[in-house]
Image: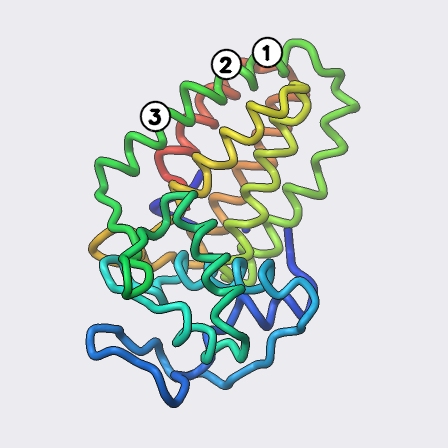
Amino acid sequence: MEQARARHTPDASSADARGRVPEQARGEHTHSEPAPPARVAVPVQRHSVRGQILEALRAALVGGELKPGEVYSAPVLGERFGVSATPVREAMQQLAHEGAVEVVPNRGFRVAERSARELAELAEIRALLEVPVMLRLARTIPAERWAELRPFAEATSVAAARGDLAAYVDTDRAFHGAILAMAGNQQLVMVADDLHRRSQWPLMSGPVHHRRADLVADAAEHSALLEALVAQDLDVVRSLVREHFTGAP
């Protein structure tokens, strides 16, 4: 459920950090580097700086504030966040590992450009990986265990009702991860999570503008999937998961 529509709700400090890319800093800025929309600068808490910057950059990527094909330097982004270049560079290295950005020597990081075909291929791989696992879980997990996942589904509904794409994508990942964790295979969870993240980065033509109604409908599929898992309705499970991936935020 990830691309054409559109995430664990953060605490107050991380919400400020990841929900805002502060206004362009004075000083270092290259002509080729685009300036994001003006924002009110919000100081980043010094504890877990790298983690906060990483989440802020992820939100900016999903929301299209960091544009595909553009190059951004760590020192300039650091000034915008009110931190040194080091945690920004470390966060960008993690994003490069995830395939969201590419390292440009002596310049910074270029936001990766995703094609519609690439996103369709990711959706196909996710379906090939997750559908058989969910069908096996539907046959073997007791109905009462699925109740443990209702808070995850409810979190996606809350984010969708707010029209908060960044939070929706986070809660959607958490929901799918919680289901797959029931298989007891940590490697599976890690691979699926990586594929999930890669499917979230915007197209080369820019991010899709998600309507709140689309997010609400997408979130409703989580509750429907839980009901199908409880009922061991394998046909509905298979259909919902495949449909969710092909129309995912």
Q: Residue drawn 47% across and 27% down?
A: 240
Mark found first going from the N terminus, 1 or 3: 3
Q: Look at the picture and state if 206 lies above or below 243.
A: below
Q: Which mark is residue 100?
A: none
Q: Which residue is tagged 1?
A: 136
Q: Position of residue 58 (x, y in %)?
A: 46, 57
Q: CA distance from mark 1 to mark 3?
A: 19 Å
Q: Position of residue 20 (x, y in %)?
A: 50, 73
Type of the residue with mark 2: Pro
Q: Which residue is tagged 3?
A: 124
Q: Residues within 10 Å of mark 2 (few under 14, many from 20)?
A: few
Q: CA distance from mark 2 to mark 1?
A: 6 Å
Type of the residue with mark 3: Glu
Q: Residue drawn 51% across and 66% down?
A: 86
Q: How many marks?
A: 3
Q: Quadrant of residue 147?
A: top right
Q: Look at the picture and state if 127 lies above or below 159.
A: above
**Helix, strand or loop for disc 1:** helix
**Helix, strand or loop for disc 2:** helix
Q: Is residue 241 left or right of residue 107?
A: right
Q: Position of residue 35 (x, y in %)?
A: 31, 78
Tags 1 and 3 in contact by the CB under 8 Å rule? no
Q: Which residue is tagged 2?
A: 132
